[in-house]
Amino acid sequence: MADNEIHAHPFADLIGLSVDTRSAGSSQCSLEVAPQLLNPHGVLHGAVLYALADTGMGGALVPTLDEGQICATIEIKFNYYKAVREGRVRCDTTVLNRGKSVANLESRLYAGDALVASANGTYAIFTPGGGKPK
């Protein structure tokens, strides 16, 4: 399997997250709100929305990588706007800037037509064991 192909994702499977579309520079993923994903207040847990954005960002960035490269999250800034209690949540992600070793991405999360959260992430791009000084 090439590095830019979809790999098994046990955590995504656990929460019911699906990568619906992905291409070099963009992706869309989604999940159905389920009782086990709610916090004690009956609202979709913020970590689930974060997982959608983080996975969407990886899905948009991986197809841009060269053979042997991988990416890893450096940081993500997240804004929550509306509580989600039911239905399907969709995450649309776009690569804003891709340099040689760092990329910046944006995700927007929707419940129906309502924007419920947004995220801006910075990712490292590197080749594992790629000639790092000792």
Image (spheres, helix red, strand yellow):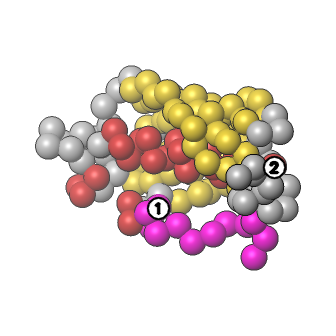
* Left or right: 106 as drawn, with respect to 112: right
Q: Which secondary structure type mostly characterizes the magenta part of the structure? A: loop
Q: Is residue 103 above or below residue 18?
A: above
Numbered tag placed on residue 89 in the rendering: none
Crowding at mark 1 (Cα within 10 Å: few <14, some 14-19, many 20+): some
Numbered tag placed on residue 12 in the rendering: 1
Residue identified by numbered label 2 = 64
Crowding at mark 2 (Cα within 10 Å: few <14, some 14-19, many 20+): some
Give the residue furthest to the left. 40
Please state which of residues 30 and 66 is positioned toward the viewer in this rendering.
66
Q: Is residue 48 above or below residue 41?
A: below
Question: In the image, which is nearer the foreground, mark 1 or mark 2?
Answer: 2
Residue 68 percent coordinates (x, y): 80, 62
Please report the bounds of the magenta region as a residue range. 1-13
Q: Going 67% across and 66% down the picture, which residue do you hit?
A: 6
Amino acid under disc 2: Thr
Residue 116 percent coordinates (x, y): 43, 29
Residue 108 seen in the current view:
no
Residue 85 magenta-highlighted: no
The mark nearer the N terminus, 1 or 2, is 1
Amino acid under disc 1: Ala
Q: Going 75% across and 51% down the picture, which residue do you hit?
A: 132
Q: Is residue 38 above or below residue 100?
A: below
| Rendering quarter of residue 49 | top left
Label 1 residue SS: helix
